[in-house]
Structures are given as structure tokens and as C-alpha cells.
Image (spheres, coloured by chain):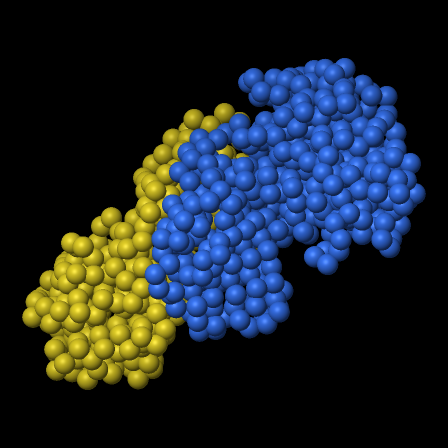
Chain colours: A yellow, B blue
Amino acid sequence: MLTQPRWWQRTSGGVTAPQGFLAAGVHCGIKQRKLDLALLVSESPATVAGVFTTNRIKAAPVLWCQEVVRRGVARAVVVNSGNANACTGERGWQDAREMAERTAQALEVPAEQVLVASTGVIGVPLPMDAVRRGILLAAQSLSRSGDDAAEAILTTDAFPKTSAVVTTLRGVPVTVGGMAKGAGMIHPRLATTLCFLTTDATVPAPVLQAALQRAVAASFNRITVDGDTSTNDTVLVLANGQAGAPPVEGGEEFERFTQALTTVAQDLAKMVVRDGEGAQRLVEVLVEGAADDADADRAAFAIATSLLVKTMLHGGEPNWGRVVAAVGYSGAAVEERRVAVWFGDVQVVRGGVAVEGVSDRAAQALRQPEVLVRVDLGLGPGRAQVWTCDIGEEYVRINGSYIT
Amino acid sequence: MLTQPRWWQRTSGGVTAPQGFLAAGVHCGIKQRKLDLALLVSESPATVAGVFTTNRIKAAPVLWCQEVVRRGVARAVVVNSGNANACTGERGWQDAREMAERTAQALEVPAEQVLVASTGVIGVPLPMDAVRRGILLAAQSLSRSGDDAAEAILTTDAFPKTSAVVTTLRGVPVTVGGMAKGAGMIHPRLATTLCFLTTDATVPAPVLQAALQRAVAASFNRITVDGDTSTNDTVLVLANGQAGAPPVEGGEEFERFTQALTTVAQDLAKMVVRDGEGAQRLVEVLVEGAADDADADRAAFAIATSLLVKTMLHGGEPNWGRVVAAVGYSGAAVEERRVAVWFGDVQVVRGGVAVEGVSDRAAQALRQPEVLVRVDLGLGPGRAQVWTCDIGEEYVRINGSYIT
């Protein structure tokens, strides 16, 4: 992707930026006061693709969505926050299905084309009276603004997350939009990430699935480790073809569309990281010179998930030994004497030992709102990029008391 | 070990509880005020065994110790705190060797029989003037008390950690003693653990190594994950034979000795967990009913290392969904409908769903100084036990500013 031209440009709006999408966000009483139910509707049947948690314990709405995605056609997404409908047994499954059915009735579309997502506390049955009320209310509140929907899917998030870009496919402008929720993470495995993407491009479901997997690999999977996810993680994309562009089948159109989708997904993934509870900084970890890309991944994720590194990034002291130690236990091949480390553009380790006289400048580099931690292992062509955040006292305070 | 009779009983003292060991702890100026250099000496040559970090980046003193252990004979251990002598290149190796040589001169023993350990900040050369002064001072301060030594090896620890037990080998009483340092951990991979064990039993070096590996597997490796360790982790045991018991070769004597060694190692490992920075609780995670022991291990470590579980344990709210979610991403085989969870003796999950009406009692169970989190996967005979601690705001405060 690095050598591709940049085909897209940013535009305003989130999930309703593409043509033919409506959205709503309402308060129905799952949470005490905040918006807690969102609805996203395509005016015409859309193809759909999805990427879901690899947790062996999957929430009922995830299982429901997997069936819809298998069929490949969707008209709407209903999302509640405040309750994950996970570990709720047979009743949870009935509740997820009822959410789809009630939404289908209100919108006069088939229930099999309604996707469902939930996020919040685990193990408590959904308050279905509130949910039913919310679905009716949301169906009456649909508009061309995605703002309330982006608000209604949040849990401990500090701010709503939306993005949209425009590109052209054979000269026809098409738009990709999206919204996401996710915070509370030292690492996204620990909290649910939901992401809903929309486009007015025409994309057959299998092509859409391929594009989504590429986009997620370069975004949400760069802030998480495969296999380590919550019970509810869900990324969905709906393509309704309303821009009237020719179908995306392959070739440059596929590259253009995937680049646009990846850009929106990366925007949202970085916002999720930046919203880490109590976090002050967005941190990019870049590992180069690893024996191969898999080793670079191991080293980058070990650094990005080390609590000692993350607390260092919070405190702002350039304790680079924690970075080197993380590389050492990551499983990546490493030769101590070849290791180099930079904080921002300040080199702090050369040949495996400290560079003298740079502490003040290194501390300065660590105290920026966006921080680069770069490691060169000096062994080969392997390269990996991961985004993370610092961890502060606030994280512990929030997660020590969080129930709903 | 569960079906063995208990052959040991506790006694007072730490590393100097066994006959023929002397110790000292002094302040030499590596730290500003606290004791920072410890010396442990056997009056006669002792056999030695060791278990070391699996981090691919090993501190110089670890490399030195591995050579001494390979030869199998030791007379003394010199330990400094406040500086890890890690990532210090060729100079670090010279400094580690000089520590052994200066200690050897002061004690009039061969340098090849002096073990060296360091803990503290990484990447800064040792202040050798202070170290040299400390070695001379410590050699003049040796006594039958291990208290100062136990104090001098600490870094961010809240309290010194010592233990000792007596057992009999063919009717002759023998003693095993020990001291450890370690804290600052959400997980011990993140901070150095040092543990020094002593005994007046007679144990050939290869037998001593086998016994130590069993003891560590049931203690320090139950609070950490193999392969995820600091650059300096070191567990050493010296056996000087001064009790006059027949050599431990195998059979019941080996079991008796190993049981005593394991008991001291477990005591110390649990103290390390209890000393987690800002921690209020010692938490035992017990997984039963896993498909096999390896799966039980995966599930137990996933629970014990989940930050959402650990912050829950700090806050004391019975948010058991976090426990179930951790099992789900652990990689262990799991069937949601078979999962049962207890906090203390209060069952909170049965058949994968919440037990109603137990929240208050469950919260009560979580707020004890010692908490049991028990999971039954209902699948097989696999069983694993892991110790961990809660995590509080204090952890973040300490590690955000810790340099020395």
C-alpha cells in the first residue's frame, strides 16, 4: 500500500456520508441517561461483509450476524450499548433474534437482513422492554445525520468516532463512511470494539469480504492480537451501490476501493486507541530490521502491550530498557549488539547500549501527544507497525468500578 | 505433591537459617539512602544450581552466573540493587566480572565461585566506585543474620521476603532458607525476580538442579509465563552440607528435600505476588475440569493476567464476564454451557450463565485480603493453579515515574 498513489480524499459525515444510508440514535433506558440504541439503515438492499471476534465464547448478536453475513445481504444494523448480551445462554439468542425481528417489522424489511450488535456488561439479560421501545423510537427518528448513532454505540468512550472518504471508481465518485466504539483498553482484547462501515459503491459480497479483511488487517488488527478479542468484537461493512459506479470486481478498482475502506478503518482504529481510558498519547510502535515480518509483529506487539512501556509512556521518562526487554521476551530473533531504539527522532540506543547525553531530548519526545517508538533490530527486512496508547491511573479507576 | 505427607515445618530466619551461611547488607551509594548491596557467603564450598530468565536479552550478571552454575561449586553471592547492569554491553560484562573478583579477594575465595546478581534500572553502567566500596564494607559486616541482606536486594518492594523450613533426611535435621525480591508486577515478566535459596543438606549439583527446577515449576513459574521474563531473573540455590546428613541422591530423601525447597520457594513467590505495587489482595486462580493440564494452564494464566480481571479484583465488583471472556480467548477448549465460576465459595456462574441473587455475597468474597477465583470448565481432568494480585492506581503511579 505504501507505493500506491493516494486515491482518496476526506469528506464530512460518518456512516451516512455515502448515498442511501439513514441513521438514528436514541435513549431507551438500558443506560440511565445517555443514548443507548442506534439504528443504521440502507434504503436499498446492500451486500454485507463482516469480521468477528475469535474469542471462543461469542455473544449471541455475533452468532446472529455471522448468519446474516453468510447470506450476504443486509438492510439494517441495530446496536445497543450498556449490555453486551454475552454469556446469557438461550435467552440471549432469543433476545438477539427478537431485536432483528422487531427492527425488521418497524422498517418493513426481512429479519434475515437485519444485523445486531451489543456492547456493555457481560452476563446480564437484555432489558427487552427498553430495547423494544428503543427500536420503535429509532425507526421513527431516522435521518441523514449519523451523529446520534455514533453517540449511541459508545460505552466508556470519551468521544464518538466517525470518518468518511471519497474516491472515484472509473470516474464515478463513491463514498466510504464509518463509525466505531471502543475504549477501556490497555489492549483492545480487553474491551469490545464495534465498527460499522458503509459505502455507496457496488461490491459483490465475496469481494467486499476480501476488501474488509485487508482493511481490518491494516487497522483493527494492528491494535490487537489475533485470537485475543472480546466476546462481542464486530466489524461490518454494507455496500448499497447507490453511487451508480460499476461493480468492484478486481484490478485497480479493487485497490482503490480497498484503500478507501482501509483509510476509514485506520482512522477509526487510531481514534479507538487515542480514546484509551485515561490515555494522553497516541503511540506508534514501528519495528524494522527484524528477521521477517512475523518477528517484527512479535516485537512490536510485545512493546505495545508491555505495561512497563505503557506506564513509561504515561510518565514520560525515557526508560528505554523496558523497550529492549520487551523485544527480548517477544520471541523475535534479536542480537543485543545490533539493537537501535528511537523515541520520536531521538536515538536512545545504538549497538545495544545507551546513547549518552540525550535524556532530556528523549523525555521531550515522549511527552508529545503523538509519540513514535522505533526499533531497528538490524537483522533483516521484517517490518511492523502497531498503534497503542499510554496507560494512566484513570484507566484503573474506570475499570475498577465499571459494571454498566 | 498433594498426596505426599508434609515432612517439613517452618522455622525462623531466611538465608542464614541453615548452618554455615553468613550474610550482610550495606549502603554503598547506588541508591540514595537505602541498603543497596548484599553479600551471602557459605563457610565451606557449596554445590550450586540455578534457573535463569529465558529473555533473549540477558543481563551480564546472568551470563556470569550461568558459567558458575555450569561448574557447580560456589562460595558466595554478591547482589546489588538500584542498577540491573543490563543492556550495558562489554562494559557490563567487565563490571559483573569485577564484582565477582573483588568479592573473591575480600573473602579469599576463587572468583569462579562467586555468583553475581543485579536489579534496578536497565541500560546505565554500574557506578563501580560505589560497588567496590560496598563489597569491602559487606565483607566486613558478615553475620548470622540475613535481615540486612534481605533488605538490600529490594527495589520497589514494600517489604523484605524471607522464609525457612526444617525437614529431616534419614533422621538428621536439615534446613532450607531463602530470600527474594520482586514487585512492580502486574505480571512478573515485567520486573526482575531474584531468589536466593540456601541449605545445609548435602546435595550433588545435578540433583540440586533437578530439585530446583521442580521447586520453581511449582512456585515462581506459577506466577509467571515461561519465556516472558525480565533480563535479570535469577533463582539460585547453594547447598553446603554442613548439617552432616547423608547426600540426597534420589528416592524419599529427594522427595523430602524437594518438598522443603518447594515450600520455601512458594512462600517467597506468594510474597512477591502479595507485594504487587499498590496491590491489596493475593489472588489464587484455580482452573479445574479443563481438557488437559496445558489447557488449564492457558485458562488460568489468561485470567490471572487479564487487566480487566485484575482491576475488577481491585474494585471488588463481581464482574465475572471478564473471567469467562479471558477463558474464551485463552486458547483452551471451552463449551460455554459447561462453564462454572466461583468467587471464594460463592458460585456466580452455572452452565455458562449467571447464578441469580448472589451479587452481594460474591462482592464480599472479592473484598477479602486473599481471594480464590475458581473456574470449572466441565470438560476433563486438567487442573492448574496460579497466583496473582489485583492492580490499583498505585501501580501506575509507581511505574509511571520509576527510573531508579
Return the x and y of residue B43 as percentages of the image width and height.
85, 26
Judged left or right of residue A4, residue A358 is right
Lateral position of residue A136 relative to residue A268, left or right? left
Residue visible at 54% across and 51% down in the picture:
B284
For the point 46% across and 28% down, the residue is A359
Where residue A40 sits: x, y (%)?
Answer: 18, 69
Q: Is residue A342 above or below residue A109?
A: above
Indicate the position of residue A224 as horizontal and vertical percent values: 42, 58
Q: Is residue A368 visible?
A: yes
On screen, residue A50 above or below A267: below
Q: Which of B260 and B196 is in front in this view?
A: B260
Image quarter of the N terminus of chain B? bottom right
Residues A373 and A312: in front is A312
For residue A357, side relative to residue B77 (left or right): left
Q: In which quarter of the image is residue A363?
A: top left
Q: Determine the residue positioned at 51% across, 58% down.
A: B374
